[in-house]
């Protein structure tokens, strides 16, 4: 369900929103570790909760982070009988402008998507203590009662996918197509992926390439993604991961008919990018949508807390590649996921 930019959309409680949350390791809660000090939203009981979403640079239907957060906001609005709309950011200068636009329109909850919006979100939360903010992928080093950072560790997601790649590669060469190294979660994906591949295959060779362009280009350049994927093919890679928004989608589609394996990112790209199915073994999931929806529900229920909220990771189903992933491989992946959760396995990111 989509709405025109900036227009409030009432979402009935009975509405359903499609979510790519299927995971081959069920049982983990989508959101946890909220800090004490819960507060409630600004809406009166007889008024619907107004929820505004400010995207990172790119489109709301990017089949990646923006879209998953938007879908989560819709699901949250449906659960509480709220109203929801979005504003797309075309450049960094739009971040503050769009946040302020929602403040001026008396939004109760403002969801901002991506690490790059962190500074603008924190500043707005300090200036507007009666508005609740949800910062997706924004680590909070200072706790504000009206600001929650939804953190879903990219290095954990990358590590789990890399562990699978290390087991299914036939050439002992794997690769990753990346956005910019100016965004820490992108770096975390890379380092996690490479560490995971080495964990299950110490002989593996890791290839990686960041997009060299400006921030308004790096996640929306599918031609570059496709060209980079083909470079990796020429270097012998036979399992290729893409963590670069629409740029990464270009890589996956280019690999579809090349007889190699590919891995999607952030949600089940079997559903969001069917063109890539011929190579798509799975997707590295960061369950963004359910995390956003849970936080919106917490606002409505008076259970919202500031600080960081830790979401979960997993792998999407293997679909046509189900027989490729053996029971022994699945056991290893279960062990990896458990180790990432309890800290007995570390990714090396940031060390």
Image: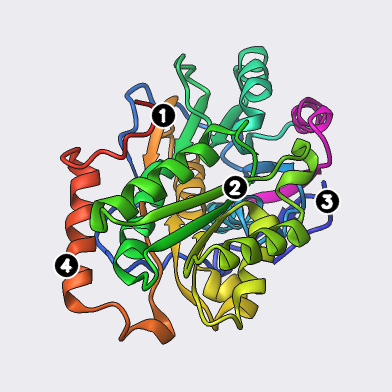
Whichever of labels 3 and 1 marks the residue nearer the N terminus, that label is 3
Whichever of labels 1 and 2 marks the residue nearer the N terminus, that label is 2
Name the mark nearer the viewer: 4 or 3.
4
Residue, disc 3: 5
Q: What element carries label 1?
A: strand
Q: What element carries label 4?
A: helix
Name the mark nearer the viewer: 3 or 1.
1
Residue 308 tag number: 1
Q: Is residue 279 above or below residue 185?
A: below
Mark pair 1, 4: CA separation:
31 Å
Whichever of labels 4 and 3 marks the residue nearer the N terminus, that label is 3
- Which span of residues is magenta-colored? 81-104
Q: Is mark 2 on a helix, strand or loop?
A: strand
Whichever of labels 4 and 2 marks the residue nearer the N terminus, that label is 2
- The residue under the point 64% across, 39% down is 180
- Residue 157 relative to residue 42: left or right: left
Residue 46 visible to an observer of this rendering: yes
Task: Using the image as rendered, state which of residue 274 and residue 123 is in the foreground.
Answer: 274
Name the mark nearer the viewer: 4 or 2.
2
Mark pair 4, 3: CA separation:
45 Å
Residue 8, given in percent of the width and then of the height, sits at: 77, 50
Callout 3 crowding tier (Cα within 10 Å): few <14, some 14–19, many ≥20: few
Residue 331 tag number: 4
């Amino acid at each position: 369900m989509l709405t025109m930019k900036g227009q409030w959309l009432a979402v009935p409680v009975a509405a359903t929103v499609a979510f790519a949350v299927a995971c081959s390791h069920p049982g983990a809660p989508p959101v946890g570790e909220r800090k004490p000090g819960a507060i409630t939203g600004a809406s009166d009981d007889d008024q619907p909760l107004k929820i505004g979403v400010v995207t990172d640079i790119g489109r709301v239907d990017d089949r990646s982070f923006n879209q998953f957060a938007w879908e989560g906001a819709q699901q949250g609005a449906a659960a509480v009988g709220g109203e929801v709309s979005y504003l797309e950011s075309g450049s960094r200068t739009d971040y503050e402008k769009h946040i302020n636009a929602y403040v001026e329109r008396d939004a109760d909850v403002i969801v901002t998507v991506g690490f790059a919006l962190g500074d603008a979100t924190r500043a707005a939360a300090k200036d507007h203590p009666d508005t609740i903010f949800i910062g997706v992928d924004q680590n909070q080093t200072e706790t504000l009662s009206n600001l929650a950072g939804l953190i879903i560790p990219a290095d954990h997601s990358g590590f789990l996918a890399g562990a699978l790649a290390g087991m299914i590669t036939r050439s002992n060469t794997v690769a990753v197509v990346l956005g910019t190294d100016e965004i820490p979660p992108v770096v975390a994906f890379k380092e996690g992926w490479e560490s995971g591949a080495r964990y299950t295959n110490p002989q593996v060779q890791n290839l990686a390439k960041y997009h060299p362009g400006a921030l308004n280009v790096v996640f929306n350049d599918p031609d570059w993604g496709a060209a980079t994927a083909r470079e990796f093919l020429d270097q012998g890679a036979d399992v290729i991961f893409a963590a670069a928004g629409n740029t990464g989608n270009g890589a996956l589609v280019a690999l579809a008919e090349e007889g190699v394996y590919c891995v999607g990112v952030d949600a089940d790209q079997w559903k969001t990018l069917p063109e890539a199915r011929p190579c798509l073994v799975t997707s590295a999931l960061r369950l963004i949508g359910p995390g956003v929806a849970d936080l919106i529900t917490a606002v409505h229920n008076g259970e919202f807390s500031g600080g960081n909220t830790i979401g979960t990771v997993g792998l999407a189903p293997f679909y046509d590649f189900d027989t490729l992933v053996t029971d022994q491989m699945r056991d290893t992946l279960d062990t990896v996921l458990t180790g990432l959760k309890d800290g007995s396995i570390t990714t090396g990111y940031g060390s």
